[in-house]
């Protein structure tokens, strides 16, 4: 196995607290309590001191949960813990909930070098927002973006959801138009997945039927392209130069650190999941589960992730990682997909064609099939 990689230059840090719990969410989270957050910060400091983290990180992403539900002093301390690692960072992202952002918190974010924010827009429909357990409205999103831009953080991404229970095409279209009116630099649009442990899952809610969901996705693709947002990944659209550098590291199967409870990371042939239990994390900040990946696993995962990118991935990226070319590994299966017009392989890229991109899961199954 050739796989020899430099230390990761990307880091994801998970904040496991929220002001309230959204009905669709199954991420590691609990209702914010000041005392619990204090103990979490102490455990986080121990974890970071114990790990040898690259001092020359390229990207950092702070997600959750809701990072901005921490009080101002705690947010300051969190970012101070990261300060030694971010002097070379090109993209420093934090997720924001407009309900919990204050002017002081905005100033703290900017002071520590945050240059990209991701805001949970989800929908502009009041009924759907209530159903999801969200407490913001369109005016709050607009004000939040104004605050960020005023502080110099103008690289702003909005998250939207579709295939929500009871959502009509008209509701989706209005939400997308409302989001576009705010002129974000990046948009992520996710189809609702009902997780068993989420509020939606426990209440027996369902997403919309497959045909309606497909119609919504097709409309989204066309509308955002017309509005000047290039689709660069299945769920992600960006203005020129505003693709997420951090998330592209995932899709190009690069290594990254996962910090805090509920975070996952990948280093070489080891993927790890940190404990999702805050109680266990406070007792042992290094508690995690390792998953060792075979060369075959890693090859397929790298292809699976890379083909999510609209432009695919460079052939030498695969060859440098594994010491074999893509065609040497997938030969007859890849050739069959090429003949069907579903896959394109040349000196510059390995990518799904337009037709293949629409049925990417089927393309991947054909590659994986032994």
Image (cartoon, rainbow, N blue to C red):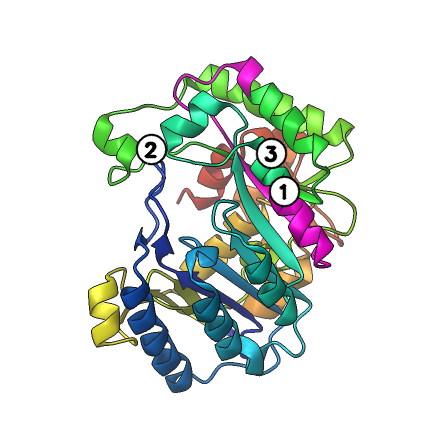
Q: Is residue 112 magenta?
A: no
Left or right side of 170 for 166: left
Q: Position of residue 198 (x, y in %)?
A: 28, 38
Labels 2, 1: front one: 1
Q: Which quadrant of the view contains residue 278?
A: bottom left
Precedes in sequence: disc 3 or disc 2: 3
Q: Which residue is mark 2?
A: 194
Q: Considering only vertical position in the picture, is 113 above or below 296?
A: below
Crowding at dot 3, Cα within 10 Å, few <14 / some 14-19 / many 20+, comes out as few
Label 3–label 2 contact, CB within 8 A: no
Question: Which label's residue is closer to the chain start, 2 or 1?
Answer: 1
- Mark 2 neighbour class, 10 Å CA radius: few under 14, some 14 to 19, many 20 or more: many
Find disc 3 in the rendering and name its residue.
139
In the displayed structure, would residue 152 be above or below residue 45?
above
Q: Answer whether labels 1 and 3 touch (C-beta < 8 Å).
A: yes
Q: Residue at x 46, y 70 (%)?
A: 73
């Amino acid at each position: 196995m050739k796989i020899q990689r430099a230390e990761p230059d990307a880091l994801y840090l998970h904040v496991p607290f929220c002001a309230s719990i959204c009905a669709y969410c199954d991420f590691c989270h609990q209702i914010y309590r000041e005392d619990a957050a204090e103990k979490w910060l102490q455990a986080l400091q121990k974890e970071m001191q114990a790990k040898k983290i690259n001092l020359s990180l390229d990207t950092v992403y702070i997600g959750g949960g809701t990072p901005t539900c921490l009080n101002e002093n705690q947010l300051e301390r969190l970012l101070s813990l990261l300060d030694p690692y971010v002097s070379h960072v090109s993209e420093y992202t934090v997720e924001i909930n407009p309900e919990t952002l204050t002017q002081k918190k905005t100033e703290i974010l900017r002071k520590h070098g945050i240059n990209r924010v991701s805001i949970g827009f989800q929908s502009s429909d009041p009924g759907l927002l209530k159903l999801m357990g969200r407490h913001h409205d369109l005016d709050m999103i607009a004000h939040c973006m104004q605050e960020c831009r005023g502080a110099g953080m103008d690289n702003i991404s909005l998250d939207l959801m579709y295939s929500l229970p009871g959502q009509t095409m008209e509701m989706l279209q209005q939400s997308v138009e409302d989001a576009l009116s705010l002129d974000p630099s990046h948009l992520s649009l996710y189809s609702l997945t009902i997780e068993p442990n989420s509020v939606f899952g426990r209440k027996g809610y369902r997403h919309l039927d497959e045909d309606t969901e497909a119609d919504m996705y097709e409309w989204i693709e066309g509308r955002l392209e017309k509005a000047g947002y290039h689709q660069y990944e299945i769920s992600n659209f960006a203005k020129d130069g505003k693709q997420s550098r951090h998330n592209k590291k995932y899709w190009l199967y690069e290594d990254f650190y996962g910090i805090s409870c509920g975070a996952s990371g990948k280093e070489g042939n080891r993927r790890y999941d940190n404990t999702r239990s805050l109680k266990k994390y406070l007792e042992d900040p290094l508690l995690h589960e390792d998953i060792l990946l075979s060369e075959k696993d890693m090859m397929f995962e790298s292809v699976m992730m890379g083909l999510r990118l609209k432009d695919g991935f460079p052939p030498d990226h695969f060859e440098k990682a594994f010491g074999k070319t893509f065609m040497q590994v997938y030969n007859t299966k890849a050739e069959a997909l090429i003949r069907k017009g579903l896959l394109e392989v040349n000196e510059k890229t390995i990518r799904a064609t337009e037709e293949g991109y629409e049925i990417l899961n089927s393309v991947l199954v054909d590659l994986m099939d032994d």
